[in-house]
Image: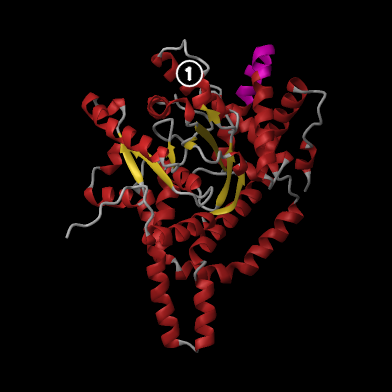
Amino acid sequence: MSREKHNIEDSSNLYGLLRYYVDYSYMGAYRKIQFVGRERIPKDAAVLYAPNHCDALMDALAVLSINHERKVFIARADVFKKPLLKKILTFYKILPINRIRDGIRSVLNSEKTIEQALNILDKEVKVCIMPEGTHRAKHSLLPIGKGVARIAYGYYNKMGADKPMYIVPVGLEYGDYFRLRSTLLVQIGEPVNVTAYISSHPERSEHDMMGDIRSLVHDALSKIIVYIEDNEDYDATWEIARLTSGSICKRNLTERLAANKVAISEVERMKAERPEQATVLFEKVTAFISERAKAKVSINAVTSHKSILAIILESLLLLVVTPIYVAAICLSSPILLICGYLCSKIEDRAFLNSVKFGIIHYLWPLFFAAWAIVMFCTLPWYVALTGTILSWFAPMASFDYFEFVRLRASDWRYIFNKKLKSKYHDIMEIFNGIVNPSSEKIDIHTQQNG
């Protein structure tokens, strides 16, 4: 008797069970995660999610965690080369698609994936594709690939104007691309009604319409992320944005995004209206970036405006809680060592968080079970139970502790670095004075405390 064939979009008990664990693990990978605009997702229509792609696997998991609706993902085909990995990816409802760089013959094979995606969309199961085609850890966008346009236009050709199809842009803003337990803002943008757009432009050729769809996706994404043109001024522009937004807002992720966008807009206006002053500012910012990296000072230390007293109190608190965190580090040491070893072998740093997350997600339950058995065999049951419950959080607590230590060390380096503080003072004076002199200025003088 033959087994019943299942489609990739079909639900399964095992997938449904693991889905809750994946969502739980993913939420735990961030100190704070915020979703904005979920109510914009169309109902009773075909939906193609299109997020910006900057943090490898973590981007797809961000889209997965938006809600509990069924979703199928499309990823580049080269990651499917190993049979075992192909089975795992297929189980997690990921389809392969080839790109032009993979060769003309490979692109022809991708037509099966496109057709499969169209059938999935027709069942009102959501599909997600990374429209840039590959990831890049930058607050910018790569050219939008043809894949998203081929699916959108193909759906219209197959279903006509009676069945609406939307591309939903998803803006992903990470507090740090390379550090676990940072922050993440997931912002749903205004859906692009592809069906309505194509229907209202019958004069456009297929080639032109494909280009239009790619442009629409690019414009929609650039509105909901920190978008900086990828040119020679990128690093300086991003540093200015962080210096201003970090001084304005500390914890609210949407406010930080808005502040970053305002600062970038002001920089672009300054470049257009006062190019000579902009050049001077960029030179100072470039020198500041170099000096800050040399001194191993985080941007948080610069923008937090802490006094010596505040740093002393935070450092004393860190010393008090250190024994607790040392216990967490000891419990999770096998995981930490594996993470450290594998991450040292990775050239593409955008994979760092994905590797750390994967190791904790898959391996920590095994080590946790082993520790639980040891504790229940050697300690009174009530002590073992308490220790088992608390030890579950050991890996993430360890990463938090490492970050606390890094930030406190950075605070101490900065508070006595008069040269760096002077450079920051000069930058903010120029930025406030030239770009937007009528607005409320950042209080740079608090940097002189202590």
Q: Which residues, given as a range, are shown in magenta?
A: 269-284
Give the residue at x 59% y 40%: 187
Type of residue at label 1? Asp
- Which residue is outermost to the bottom? 380
* Residue at image coords 42%, 20%: 210
Residue at (38, 57) in percent of width and height:
15
Query: Is 31 placed left or right of 350 in the picture?
Result: right
Instruction: Answer yes or no: is residue 110 visible.
Output: yes
Q: Where residue 433 sits: x, y (%)? A: 77, 23
The correct choice, above or below, for 111 with respect to 212 in the image is: below
**Please, is residue 268 above or below residue 362 in the view?**
above
Query: How far from the left and from the top, in percent, is residue 412?
Result: 65, 51
- Mark 1 surroundings within 10 Å by alpha-carbon count, few (fewer than 14), some (14 through 19), many (20 or more): some
Prevailing secondary structure class for the magenta stretch in the rendered image:
helix
- 247 and 292: which is toward the camera: 247
Counting from the top left corner in percent of width and height, residue 320 is at: 65, 69
* Position above or below: 358 against 231: below
* Residue 42 position within the rendered picture, expressed as x and y whole percent measured from the top left: 56, 38
